[in-house]
Image: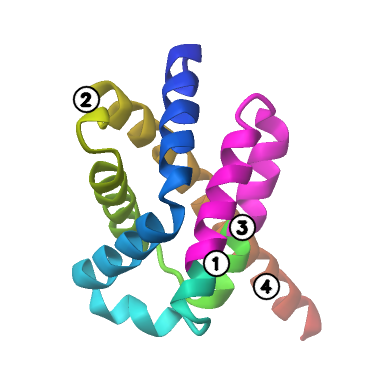
Amino acid sequence: MSPDQVHLIRKSFAELSRLEHVAALVFYRRLFELDPKLRSLFTADIEEQSRKLIDMLGVLISMLERPVGLELELRAMGARHAGYGVKDEHYATVGQALLDMLASALGEDFTPEVRAAWTELYGAVESTMKAGALESDSDVLHDHRADK
């Protein structure tokens, strides 16, 4: 990501943070509209889940200048999410819900440039989390074969 994109993400996240509770609820409402079956993956209260979403985005954004640490965190998160039942096809739905939440929260400040920056960021998040999920599947398969 370019420094300008990082700046746009940080600035838009600061705006989003002022509306964090409402924005996160918009995210989950939109996510479940796009794919109602995803509701079953969330055992926690949506209020709690909303807080976790904003916290996770804050951590991710705070690590943008530390790509190695960010990659390790995202791979671990991908492995955890695979354990929760998240499948590869769910990532596109989450990405769409994220962009819809940002558009709703930021209004006219959600410019094409801001959208492009978040789209690039989420693409990197998605591919890294999927890699972490795949690695965890390989580890489980390897451990299972070693037990025999």
- Disc 1 is placed on an element classified as helix
Residue at label 3?
A: 77
Q: Quadrant of residue 134?
A: bottom right
Q: CA distance from mark 4 to mark 2?
A: 41 Å
- Disc 4 is placed on an element classified as helix
- Disc 2 is placed on an element classified as helix
- Mark 4: amino acid: Val
Identified at 57% across, 58% down, the residue is 78
How many other residues sit within 10 Å of disc 4, few (<14), some (14-19) or many (≥20)?
A: few
- Mark 2: amino acid: Pro
Q: Which disc number belongs to residue 112?
A: 2
Q: CA distance from mark 2 to mark 3?
A: 29 Å
| Residue nearer the viewer, 52 or 37 | 52
CB contact under 8 Å: marks 1 and 3: yes
Return the disc, 3 or 4, that comes first in the chain's sequence.
3
Front position among marks 4 and 2: 2
Q: Is residue 61 left or right of residue 108?
A: right
Q: CA distance from mark 3 to mark 4?
A: 16 Å
Front position among marks 1 and 2: 2
Q: Which disc number belongs to residue 140?
A: 4
**Which stretch appears magenta?**
50-77
Return the disc, 4 or 1, that comes first in the chain's sequence.
1
CB contact under 8 Å: marks 4 and 1: no
Q: Which disc number belongs to residue 81?
A: 1
